Image (tube, rainbow, N blue to C red):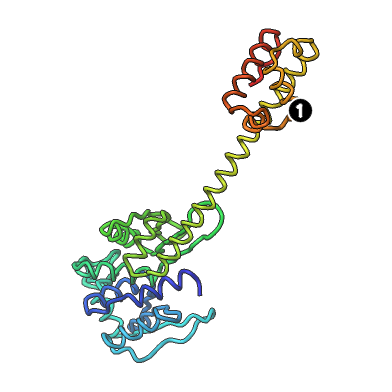
Amino acid sequence: MTFSQSVKNQIIRAFSGDACCSLSFLSAYTHTAGWLSLSDGNMRLTLPAGSGAVRQMLVRLLHSRYGLSKQGGADSRGSRSLKLEGAQAKALLSDGGILTRGEDGGFALAPGLDPYLTENECCKRSYIAGAFCGSGYAGLSERGEGNSVHVEFAVKSAQLAEDISKLLAEFSVPSKLSARGENHLVYIKDSRAAADFFALLGATRALLKLSEVVVEREASNLENRKNNCYIANVDKTVDAAIKQVEAITKLDADGRLQSLPPRLREAAELRLAHKTDSIDELAERAGISKSGMNNRLRRLAAIAAQAGYRQLT
């Protein structure tokens, strides 16, 4: 089972099933996933339902509300569908605010959701749940860079996409709108917004899995930053040591090294003997503090500078 299928199953298990919420769910599912056709004046509504909890929910709701008794077969990809014809199809489309009267007295398809379907807060959640089960996708990336999660709705109507986005905003779940081919997308890529989305629809396991992935990726990113910082510090240490060794070597060749005070000469000799040591390691070898070793190397730098050699640091 994919992560997206798991999310939908969790949403169905958390669904209340009240009469008002059932209609909101069915309307959203039908509006986002349904196919309507007319043949010899007969109206046929096809709802791709796949399998699992979503299909079982649709069969139960359609049977109780519209007396669905005949189920469609499988298509070429093995995906099963539900079919309503004639009065059943017209009743669902009318009740769900999808089929409306046009200006010429004929029927027309509504571009967006009917506000009466989302008057109650529970119905708003149910509409979002139905829209996601009908046209939604959720992906979770456990490794790599970029966003950890991607949630989207893909619908045919720009107005419906905007309506879904506004519903999400009412629950403080920010989303963005885009287009892909003939589809209009409502998508969420921010991990916190996706977590709020899963919590809103009762997808508790998805929420916990997302939290786990985010924590692991943040820990991994922190470790990478630490490693990068360590590498950068090593590079700086090595670069500084090379400069110090070059200058001390020139001081020695010029006969100046032996004339230095014992403490400076010791620091210079330690640097020549341990070319890749850090300041901490040199200080430990000399039995002095890090600041003490720094001071000695700075004094060597000043002497080298006066002699016209490159800086030690």
Where is residue 132? Give x, y as percent.
Answer: 37, 68
Give 287 or 179, whichever is nearer the viewer.
287
Give 12 or 207, whichever is nearer the viewer.
207
Name the outermost residue toward the bottom. Answer: 69
Where is residue 150? Give x, y as percent.
Answer: 45, 59
State the residue at coordinates (54%, 79%): 77
State the residue at coordinates (37%, 53%): 176
Image quadrant in which you'd find residue 287 = top right
- Residue 235's place in the image compared with 191, above or below, is above
Image quadrant in which you'd find residue 187 = bottom left
Mark 1 crowdedness (10 Å alpha carbons): few <14, some 14-19, many ≥20: few
Residue for badge 1:
273
Q: Report how many numbered discs are placed on residues in the image.
A: 1
Image quadrant in which you'd find residue 271 = top right
State the residue at coordinates (61%, 27%): 288
Where is residue 116? Give x, y as percent.
Answer: 19, 68
